[in-house]
Amino acid sequence: MVRSKFNRVLPRVRVAKQCRIAWADYEACGHTSNASYGGIAAEFPRGMKWRHQEAILTLLPEEITLRVRPVRFERKGRTTKVAFGVEGIENGGQEWEQLNCLPRS
């Protein structure tokens, strides 16, 4: 079992990509900051409407599509950083796996 320096079972990697979050009636664009197999963090404009329910998060340009659920919100100036739990991978499973590969030391 791999553990990070913060004793995480699923270590985070830096992932700076454009992304889009979508619910049935609303969507917004933002950018990611880090990810692990079980979660991903992204920043969005501060004024957007948040729903505490499952959504679809698409990483661009790869079109990796994840079913996510927001678990934590942090306001940072003009943006809101949101931590999501990954509920499932809808598209791009192999790319998601490659994105989360950590270099071996």
Image: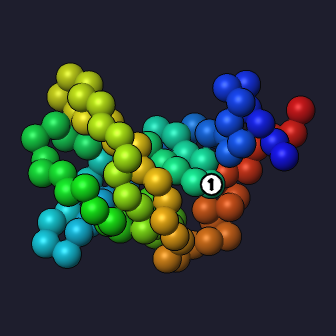
On the question of residue 18 being in view, the answer is no
Is 1 in front, or is 98?
1
Q: Residue at x 16, y 37 (%)?
A: 46
Label 1 crowd (10 A; few <14 / some 14-19 / many >=20): some
From the viewer's side, name the closer residue of 76 and 5. 5
Drawn side of residue 55 relative to residue 32, left or right? left
Q: x, y (%) of residue 66? A: 46, 66
Q: Secondary structure at mark 1?
A: loop
Residue furthest to the right: 105
* Quarter holding residue 105: top right
Residue at 57% from the left image edge and 37% from the top image edge: 14
x and y, in percent, of residue 104 in the image? 87, 39
Residue 74 percent coordinates (x, y): 30, 31
At x 20% / y 57%, what residue is drawn?
Answer: 51
Which residue is nearer to you in this view: 45 or 1?
Answer: 1
Q: Which residue bears the numbered disc 1?
A: 37
Amino acid found under the numbered disc labelled 1: Tyr
Seen in the picture, residue 100 relative to 13 is either above or below; the reply is: below
The structure's colour scheme is rainbow
**How far across and how far down the image is residue 61, in percent?**
45, 62
- Seen at 19% across and 40% down, the residue is 45
Q: Is residue 27 left or right of residue 72?
A: left
